[in-house]
Amino acid sequence: MRKLFLIAILYLSGHFGLAQVFPSEVWHDGKLVLLEGDTLVGQVKYNLETDLVQFTRDNQTVKAFTARKLLFFEIFDKTVNRYRQFYAIPYNVKSNYKAPVMFEVLYTGEHLSLLSREAIEYQVANYPYSMAGTYTRLELVYTHYFLKPDGSIIQFTGKKKDLLWVMNKKSSEIKRYIKNNKIRIDRRSDLVKLVAYYNSLFGE
């Protein structure tokens, strides 16, 4: 028992010491398309919390662009080994005021698209062998949004009733799909599947 306890402590000590690398902290191969039409190809670093994108070519001068100056940017994210695209889209930052905000496009559909923004936040973690029981650590947190054909953007609350309200034209089919396929609406990949399925219903 004592040996198992020591192994657990050593494991957790190593786990706590690991520093997670977040995509927004890394320079990625990518390109920017400016609002004026120019395309810049090189190294890209982004921060969606500040809507600021940095660009450099051959590790020389670093240029910074806000969402107001960009049309979109694309990166090859080595942390997940895939391409990712982000667009500057007008969003209601206040009740009567819209401003360009950077969104990652997860799925594009004729009737509904899925967008995302990310932030690094402290989250509470529980470990059964931890002396304290719980502790906080920085984690990547996603907020998802639905883009409708009229250009309006709705932030997803994570609640099923709100999801069905957004997809009210096909709510009965969506309910069955969630149940039959054991869809978890709090899971990013399942949310993409759900939006793709919703769009497919209009082709029948």
Image (tube, rainbow, N blue to C red):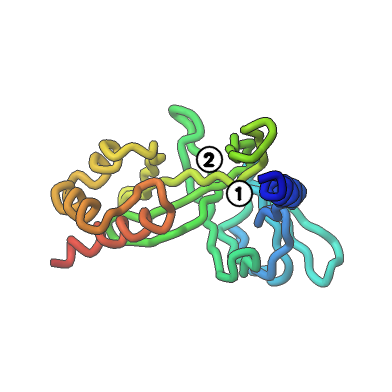
Residue at horizontal 41 percent and vertical 51 percent from the top: 187
* Nearer the observer, 108 or 37: 108
Q: Secondary structure at mark 1?
A: helix
Q: Secondary structure at mark 2?
A: strand
Give the image location of residue 68, x and y in percent: 60, 48
Q: Kindly identify the amino acid type of the residue bearing the numbered disc 2.
A: Ala
Give the image location of residue 103, x and y in percent: 51, 51
Vertical comparison of 100 with 192: above or below:
above
Vertical comparison of 188 with 81: above or below:
above
Identify residue for label 2. 99
Quarter placement of the C terminus: bottom left
Identify residue for label 1. 67
Q: Is residue 132 visible?
A: yes
Vertical comparison of 148 with 40: above or below:
above
Q: Are marks 1 and 2 in contact (CB under 8 Å)?
A: yes
Vertical comparison of 60 with 179: above or below:
below
**Marker disc for residue 7:** none
Q: Quadrant of residue 130?
A: top right
Give the image location of residue 138, x and y in percent: 66, 41
Q: Is residue 15 visible?
A: no
Residue 112 located left or right of residue 17: left
Quarter placement of the N terminus: top right
